[in-house]
Structures are given as C-alpha cells and as structure tokens.
Image: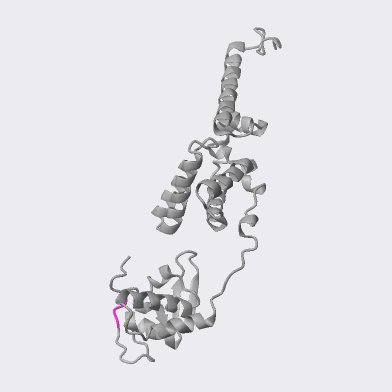
Amino acid sequence: WDAASGRFAKSFPDHKRENDMLRTYEQRAADAVRAMERDGVAFTFERIERALFGDAAAGGSMSVVLWLRTLSAEFEARGKYCNSRIYHYAANTLEAFRPRAALADVDRAFLVKFERWLESDRDVNDGGASLYFRTIRAACNGAISDGIMPRSWYPFEAFSLAHLTKGKAKKAAPIDFFRALEQLQNMQQLEGWQAGALDLFLFSFYTRGMNLADIAELTAASLHNGRIVYTRKKTGREYSVRLNEKAAAIWGRYCISNLPFLPKAEKAEKNFHFFHVEGMED
C-alpha cells in the first residue's frame, strides 16, 4: 500500500484494477457529499456508507417515488383502488418534497424534515401527516419483505408516529343528532339526492357503521333470516349484522326483497344491488 498516494502499490496483485475501483468509490462519495449540500442534508458517515454500498443492498438506490408508484399500481391491479390512490398521492407529495430521494435516503432526519415541510409548505395537520407516514412506513416494510431494502435501514425504529395522534380525543355525536336526522326523513322538502344521502348515512348507523363501499355491494342475497351477512371489502372479514326495523325500512326502499316483516315485499332478482339511487351513481 502506498500511503502517500492513497493507492495500492505496483507490487500489489492486479493493482491497476484495484486502484480503478478505489477511484470509483471516491467519485461516489464525492457525489454523495454534493447531493447532501444541494438538498440541505446534514453530513453523516451512515449516509456516505449508504451512497457507496446502496447498490449492494439489492435496490437500496431505488427511488422512493418509483417504489410508491409501483405499490400503487399493484393495489390497482388487485382492485384495491382506495389503497392505490393513497400511495399515488403519497408519491406525488414526496416527489414535490424530494424528487430524487432513494430508499437509502429515508432515515429519521429525512422524515423529520418531511414532517416540517408538510406543515409549513402544504399546511397539512397531524391527521393528514399521519396518513402519509403510515403509507411510507408500510412501503418500507414492503421493501424489506421484498429484499429491496435491508432491515438495518428501517427508519421508523427511530421515528415514532405517536406524537401525530397523541391527545386526539374522539368526539361522539349525541343521540339527539340522529333523532333529528330521523325527523328529516319525513320532510317533503328534501330533494331525491338529499333523501338518498340521508338514507345511506342512517343505514350505516343502524348497521353498526357499515362502510359505504360495503353498502354499495349489498344485494337481496345478502339477507339471511333478518341479518345482513357481508364480507368487508377492505379487510376481507365476514360480518353478520341484524337488520332492525328502521334499517329494514330503508332497505325496502332500494332493494326489493322477500322480507317477511316489510309490507308489499316482492321477490327480487339475486343480483339486484341495494345502492341504486337516482343521481348518485358516482
């Protein structure tokens, strides 16, 4: 080793190739330092190490934005459109924040700056920020599972999301609020779409908070002995909810069924959907 030149001496086997490799790493390190200065990122030896050896981690240099959009496309292909949109929006936001960031760049300092940027530049509150960070966290977990990102790079060991939800008390609507909504159902002044929206909201309330996406999939075949049996679209879990008289009255206005306790009930075709409200196709 030639200490003066910082190179392998000529006596070292294959010294020219080895010295070329050293120059390659020196250039990577110099590029990493310039990138830190350009992006206002504090210098750390860990970041230098990631810049030098990220490629050896099977994709550590992959763009964060590209990875999020890849996951968005996968969710869309599986029919999980809501998840797809969340990852799509997260990708767009991160592209505006740090378009050239790689998975190897996502550490605690990156996440702290992203949180501050969301607050100052995008006026995003804690709830909105929490959604972005949960999405990034899930993307990092997916990258680790797929071997794209080593576990040692996982940034959420040092960055907790607890402060984004701490102290947020849940507010419950008083029962009088729902009683007032029930009174509105009898008012003739409501337009068709207003009556439909009110029915959907109350139906969800009567069925223990059934998600509107699940209500949209209900058919006459979903009813079994006075209970609605359905599989929740988001989780794939099966639920069984008793249909009380008020929910049954709403059901009868949109899905003709052979319910024994509803007057003028008629048998419907098996695939007749509940969610048929004029003017509310979207």
Our reading of the magenta stretch's main secondary structure is: loop
Q: Position of residue 209 (x, y in %)?
A: 49, 74
Residue 253 vs 155, above or below: the answer is: below
Residue 69 coordinates in the image, percent (x, y) = 44, 46
Tell me how many marks there are: 0
Q: Residue at x 44, y 66 (%)?
A: 233
Looking at the image, which residue is at 38% across and 86% down?
Answer: 249
Give the residue at the far top of this rendering: 10
Q: Residue shown at 53%/35% (left/top)?
A: 61
Which quarter shows the N terminus?
top right
Image quadrant where residue 108 sits: top right
Q: Is residue 256 left or right of residue 247?
A: left
Percent of width and height locating residue 202:
44, 79
Report the residue at 56% width, 51% height from top: 133
Q: Nearer the viewer, residue 108 or 74?
A: 108
| Residue 272 seen in render | no
Q: Quadrant of residue 53?
A: top right
Q: How is the image coloured?
A: one colour
Q: Is residue 82 magenta?
A: no
Q: Is residue 231 visible?
A: yes
Residue 32 in picture, x, y percent from top left = 57, 28
Q: Write the start and end of the magenta stretch as one range.
A: 268-272
Q: Is residue 155 left or right of residue 203?
A: right
Quadrant in the picture for the C terminus: bottom left
Q: Nearer the viewer, residue 257 or 81?
A: 81
Q: Front-most of 166 and 246?
A: 166
Q: Nearer the viewer, residue 31 or 41?
A: 41
